[in-house]
Image (tube, coloured by chain):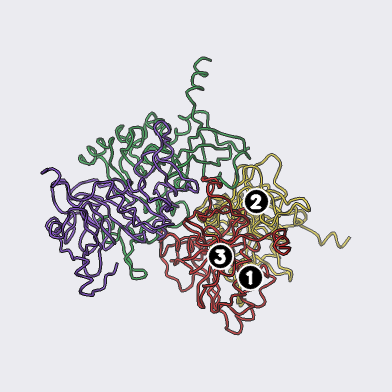
Chain colours: A red, B green, C yellow, D purple
Amino acid sequence: MIQKKFENIAKAVADIHDGATLLVGGFGGSGLPSHLIAALVEQGAKNLTVVSNNIGAVSDGVAALISNNQVKKIICSFPVGPHADDLIARLQNGAIELEISPQGTLAERIRAGGSGIPAFYTPTAAHTELGAGKETRVFNGRLHVLEYAITGDYAFIKGHRADRWGNLVYNKTQRNFNPVMATAARITIAEVDEIVEVGELDPENIATQSVYVHRLVKLVTLREEEVLANG
Amino acid sequence: MIQKKFENIAKAVADIHDGATLLVGGFGGSGLPSHLIAALVEQGAKNLTVVSNNIGAVSDGVAALISNNQVKKIICSFPVGPHADDLIARLQNGAIELEISPQGTLAERIRAGGSGIPAFYTPTAAHTELGAGKETRVFNGRLHVLEYAITGDYAFIKGHRADRWGNLVYNKTQRNFNPVMATAARITIAEVDEIVEVGELDPENIATQSVYVHRLVKLVTLREEEVLANG
Amino acid sequence: MVKDELKVGWSKIQLASRVAQDLEDGWFVNLGIGIPTLVADVIPEGREIILHSENGLLGLGPKPAPGEEDMDLVNAGKEPITLKPGGSFFSQSDSFAMIRGGHLDAAVLGAFQVSMYGDLASWKVPNDPLGRVGGAMDLTVGAKRVFLCMQHCTKKGESKIVEECTYPLTAPRCVDRIYTDLAVIDVTNDGLVVQELAPGVTFKYLQERTAAPLKDLADQLVKGESIQH
Amino acid sequence: MVKDELKVGWSKIQLASRVAQDLEDGWFVNLGIGIPTLVADVIPEGREIILHSENGLLGLGPKPAPGEEDMDLVNAGKEPITLKPGGSFFSQSDSFAMIRGGHLDAAVLGAFQVSMYGDLASWKVPNDPLGRVGGAMDLTVGAKRVFLCMQHCTKKGESKIVEECTYPLTAPRCVDRIYTDLAVIDVTNDGLVVQELAPGVTFKYLQERTAAPLKDLADQLVKGESIQH
């Protein structure tokens, strides 16, 4: 029987190795798998390459991994924000390498990674600093740059509801990068608010299909924590 | 106020010009916009380039346009079936040109067309007759072919329910090529079973967003036809 | 009354209203961070404009009432918003397929600099090791029309409209129209053509505050030149 | 009793069952048109195999009861099927992203020819102006394992297993294992290795009906050669 639920969030991230590439969903704090990030801070894997749209928007996002000196490279579109100080310091002393990818190119590179497309051409960033040094080609009279797929060893995503097969639905703009990152990692780990019986999710409305999710962690609510604490 | 509904199916297809490129959704008879096809047979536009997965699976699909001598070129993955005789005859006398694209490559070329990606690399069809003559390149030690985007002047799609903004939901495997084709045409025309009030469709479950649909035609049911006929 | 003499031109909300006036019924429009965000609040009544947010929604509605914010319902600036009936949610890859594929009628964006040729610089100041590109490059190459909505000059009083951008480009030759607190200016094959002056602004006043040559629409029309954009 | 002597090997449903036996709990599997489709009906009890259909669904269930067919719920062969609890619907582009992206554990496909190197020919007979490629090329490049499930010989009695394919290729070097009515054969770096013979089939009988050299698993193991696939 398929059962992707892990009872223990620490076990769900235990095998992440030093040097792994990690895709982290979310857009600012919305749809951010912050509990998985906290578990990875605890776990301590180092020299990570982290792919995530926003760095520094919130303190419990990728910024926490940076502050804990677990990151050697960042690929993102928006490396600024109120919690970017540690990133800036590490860029200045060369401890972290930064690759900025336009947001749509970043999303498309991850989709390509999940879809078996190794590279594609896009007009985005042609004639700009972010396109500089990249292979270019003219299609329909317009300059395009060649962009390469991104895949991860692991993806951390946040969903709203799941079933034990790994099907996921999201809540509103929580969706953002989560469905696309789910497709592009060898092991996708989802933290979710709720795990329901197989068959309860509407088959027309499953935004991430079971095939893409390998591990599930259900967030424990404050109420449940109280119950657990009180035995 | 946005109102994409056309009361008359003939008006919805009236401006399709000779030589137009037309994307036709459906997989066999499922999700096939057969009423729009019938309206175009009536309308008579000629020298069409038609992009559709199956040719000949059913008589009221693209086969009807072929039999009526409206097609000069077909791009598809599956040109056979019980209703492919007229296609075969026209291929033999040179009246129709056929381009076979593997099903996944076909879907991805259409997605690329709708997404502003002019070309991409895929491993599909490398080292085969369908990859012959195409530009190739090795990524990760594996040969890939360069495939180009497909766009249409018009797309015919079939949906289940719509609202006047043009949002669509589908019924089960009716979905197939319809959502991707909807993104890739200058004018997308959808035939649907039902048009509901704006706000009635679940915002988490809109498979084709309003931005992609330009004209809507509601299918008249047999019951409604009776009512119309009886005044 | 000296103070009033200094306050020529449009306020931020007036500027947003002026932009909104040009958005047509049924258009799909993306609003950038900053003054462009204000456009959402001043869409003329009776007009249906469907607003797109690049984090994955169509049908962005007004700000929620205090206390009704939902951190799972935010705009591209990560501020709480609402969804209009008819709205929809989708992923980032779908959102940028929509943008890059040319499906948005207009993007209304801020700018650091814009050149007389419509080159836009909006994501990075020179020598900044970071930069904040977000979706700006995708929007400028993808939207059918790129409208800028910005203060005419920087806080230091420098013109944001220049002959050539000195800041890193977001995209070349992409801006169609510039709305500032002082004027509405089209980027045309004939150069920058002033379509409209804000209250109290003269052509001379505007040209003095603009580091690129401007043409007066009236002159252009008298000369019978074609205005294209 | 002559008739019985001729009927060595597995029936179609026995062949499908033999394939099903090797599909592991939790696998995502695509079944091609023809005999592979039968595999859906013979999954061992207690094992959850999630079947994929390239027209856009995961969780394909058994055929519907007569009278309960829904033409909006069909498989890749356009036949009515059902959806299991936990199943989902998605578009063709999403379906082939799943296939091409390497997310399916196995594809079980039919074949015209397969070479001793694992080259597959399954979409076109030589000189046919048409061909029926469908999703075959995408599945063969994308699935983690490609299993063939076919009659060992054509109706004319010719071996479908050959040294080099003479039919147009679907993909080179893609087949991992061949299930026929006569045997289960692995495509390895050491050539075709017979893993299992169907009832009544001897190695000699099989080799006589196979137009490529076969190796016997027992011999291989005795010789201590490594079997890889």
On the same chain: label 3 and label 2?
A: no
Residue B144 % position (x, y) = 33, 63
Q: Which chain letter goes with mark 1?
A: A
Q: Which chain letter goes with mark 2?
A: C
Q: Nearer the viewer, mark 1 or mark 2?
A: 1
Residue type at tag 1 = Ala
Residue type at tag 2 = Ala
Along the line of sight, which residue is nearer the eye, C95 or C49? C95
Where is mark 3, residue-wise?
A156
Residue A104 % position (x, y) = 53, 61
Q: CA distance from mark 1 to mark 2?
A: 63 Å
Residue D148 % position (x, y) = 27, 55
Residue found at the very far bottom of the displayed protein: A93
> Dot 2, how many residues are within 10 Å of its Cα: few (below 14), some (14-19), or many (20+)?
few
Q: Nearer the viewer, mark 3 or mark 2?
A: 3
The answer to whether C54 appears left or right of B42 in the picture is right
Q: Which chain letter goes with mark 3?
A: A
Along the line of sight, which residue is nearer the eye, C217 or B33? B33
Residue type at tag 3 = Phe
Residue found at the very far front of the displayed protein: D1
Q: CA distance from mark 1 to mark 3?
A: 11 Å
> Dot 3, how many residues are within 10 Å of its Cα: few (below 14), some (14-19), or many (20+)?
many
Where is mark 2, residue-wise?
C218
